[in-house]
Amino acid sequence: MNHELRRPGDDDPIVMTAEERSVWVYLAVVAITSTAYFAVVIPRAVSQPIEDVSWITPMLWTLGFSIAGTIVGSIVGSISGAVGLAIRGIRPEGQLEGDQRDKDIRRMGDQRAALAASSAMFVVLVLAMIGADLFWIGNTVFLAGTVGALLETTTKIRAYRRGF
Amino acid sequence: MPPKPTKVTNRVRTLRFESGEMTQADLAEHLKVTRQTVIAIEQGKYSPSLEMAFEIARVFKRPLDDVFQYAAGGTDDQPSS
């Protein structure tokens, strides 16, 4: 790149858009809550019969924390982004809100998540056909949601950072 | 992480420099996109839609193929990787 082609404003720090910030928040929340869930449920599944494992309450807590964490984290991230720009004396206009590139990246991520969801549907169907315990059906859906979220967020972050 | 190679190259950075005091933020404002998107286009990390490509060409008052090229090689605006 020719570094002589640089206007003064070009050296301003590059901040994440609110969309990209939300993706990072979502990735962090899903990774933390899902890890916590499996840390609770897997030892139970190993130590007692599957039909006796209590998994519904931990899963409900996990889903609740995931939703609340993503919402609160995105709000806090947006505010901190705007405050960070203000402290550095940079106009937030045109820096934080999403645009066509964000929409394109969102579409790419959504496609990956949909792929994971459709694969999970097939596995769940097979589990139901063979009469598997509800533990396996519920946790397969949960695992698919986790994998889908991780695929979605890593695809988006890769697109933001590396391009597409 | 190195940018993903794209066959679409552009002269946005050069044209912006040749257009007086136009900054990335100024161009972003013209196009109604974020500055991050302008940076991604200049670095070859994002190929804009055809509509946005025409908008960019219009801002610089140049024909489209003066701004964007579709070729195997790069231009002096693009990272060589």
Image (cartoon, helix red, strand yellow):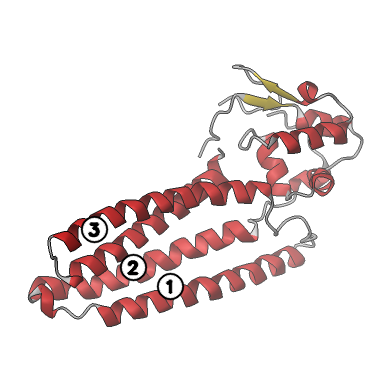
Q: Label 1 vs label 2: CA separation?
A: 9 Å
B36 on left or right of A157: right
**Which mark, residue A112?**
none
Residue B52, image quadrant: top right
Answer few, some or many: residues within 10 Å of disc 3's Cα (few below 14, many 20 plus, some between 14 and 19).
Answer: few
Residue occupying image coordinates x 63% and y 37%:
B46
A107 on left or right of A98: left
Q: Label 2 vs label 3: CA separation?
A: 23 Å
Residue occupying image coordinates x 31% and y 72%:
A36
- Per the image, the residue denoted by label 3 is A125
Q: Which one is in front in this view, the residue at disc 1 or the one at disc 3?
A: 3
Q: Is disc 2 placed on a helix, strand or loop?
A: helix
Closer to the camera, B8 or A134?
A: A134
- Per the image, the residue denoted by label 2 is A34
Q: Chain of mark 3?
A: A
For the C terminus of chain B, the image quarter is top right
Q: Is disc 1 placed on a helix, strand or loop?
A: helix
- Per the image, the residue denoted by label 1 is A66
Closer to the camera, A122 or A13?
A: A122
Answer few, some or many: residues within 10 Å of disc 2's Cα (few below 14, many 20 plus, some between 14 and 19).
Answer: many
Cβ–Cβ under 8 Å for marks 1 and 2: yes
Instruction: Give percent across and percent down for residue B7.
Output: 60, 24
Residue occupying image coordinates x 24% and y 55%:
A123
Q: Chain of mark 1?
A: A
Amino acid at pointer 1: Ser
Residue B65, image quadrant: top right
Residue B3 seen in the figure: yes
Q: Are marks 2 and 3 on the same chain?
A: yes
Instruction: Give percent across and percent down for residue A72.
Output: 55, 76
Instruction: Give percent across and percent down for residue B19.
Output: 89, 33
Q: Label 1 vs label 3: CA separation?
A: 26 Å
Amino acid at pointer 2: Ser
